[in-house]
Image: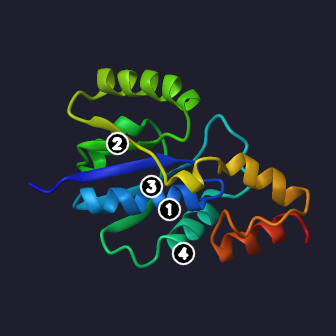
């Protein structure tokens, strides 16, 4: 039986921390679907189409990884993809409480899908999409935190 995992998120934008999580997951599972959420509660900087394109570029070369957009509940999307695992990244202890609660709720919604937590490499623990957007908006250099195409996309968004 193939093990299919989804890694859901808004990825606004995808960071090197996200890419590291995907790389780790790609070694553990037969197929990874990076599920880019059409955000319902967040105002995103990039459109879903842009976020899918940037993620596809950043993850190019990972043979068992696909990037797709989705709307609705993660648990329903997992059924659609025939996934039996949801991947969530943890950067710090502060992430755990929210993610633990979400995993419990997802189990109630679809008990056939397990949530696993992966941590990025230590040198990537501090990176978040919101910090990358903030630094880029203030004309800071984010090239150490994101793929080069993401850097250019952020520069275009902020008129640099």
CB-based contact (under 8 Å), mark 4 and mark 1: no
Which residue in the protein does label 2 denote? 86
Q: CA distance from mark 4 to mark 2?
A: 22 Å
**Mark 4: which secondary structure?**
helix
- Which badge, 4 or 1, is on the more N-terminal residue? 1
User: Residue 129 in the image: x percent, y percent?
Assistant: 67, 51
* Residue at 40% from the left image edge and 63% from the top image edge: 23
User: Disc 2 vs disc 1: which is toward the camera?
Assistant: 1
Q: CA distance from mark 4 to mark 1?
A: 11 Å
User: Disc 3 vs disc 2: which is toward the camera?
Assistant: 3
Give left or right: position of 48 versus 97: right
Counting other residues with Cα less than 10 Å from the Cα at mark 3, is it few (<14), some (14-19), or many (20 or more)?
Answer: many
CB-based contact (under 8 Å), mark 4 and mark 3: no
Which residue in the protein does label 3 denote? 21
CB-based contact (under 8 Å), mark 3 and mark 1: yes
- Which badge, 4 or 2, is on the more N-terminal residue? 4
* Residue at 22% from the left image edge and 61% from the top image edge: 30
Q: CA distance from mark 2 to mark 1?
A: 16 Å
**Mark 1: which secondary structure?**
helix
* Above or below, comparing residue 35 to residue 16 in the picture: above
Q: Residue furthest left?
A: 1
Which residue in the protein does label 1 denote? 19
**Closest to the observer: 99 or 12?**
99
CB-based contact (under 8 Å), mark 4 and mark 2: no
Which residue in the protein does label 4 denote? 57
- Which badge, 4 or 3, is on the more N-terminal residue? 3
**Mark 3: which secondary structure?**
helix
Give left or right: position of 107 versus 20: left
- Which badge, 2 or 1, is on the more N-terminal residue? 1
Q: Specify the quadrant that holds the N terminus.
A: bottom left
């Amino acid at each position: 039986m193939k093990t299919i995992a989804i890694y859901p998120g808004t990825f606004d934008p995808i960071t090197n921390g996200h890419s590291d999580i995907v790389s780790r997951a790609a070694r553990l599972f037969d197929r990874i679907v990076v599920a880019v959420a059409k955000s319902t509660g967040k105002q995103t900087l990039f459109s879903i189409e842009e976020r899918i394109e940037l993620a596809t570029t950043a993850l190019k070369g990972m043979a068992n990884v696909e990037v797709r957009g989705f709307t609705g509940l993660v648990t329903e999307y997992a059924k659609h993809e025939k996934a039996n695992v949801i991947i969530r990244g943890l950067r710090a202890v502060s992430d755990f409480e929210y993610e633990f609660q979400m995993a419990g709720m997802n189990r109630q919604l679809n008990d056939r899908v397990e949530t696993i937590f992966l941590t990025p490499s230590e040198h990537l623990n501090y990176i978040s999409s919101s910090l990358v957007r903030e630094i880029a908006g203030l004309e800071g250099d984010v090239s150490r935190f994101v793929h080069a195409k993401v850097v250019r996309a952020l520069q275009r968004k902020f008129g640099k």
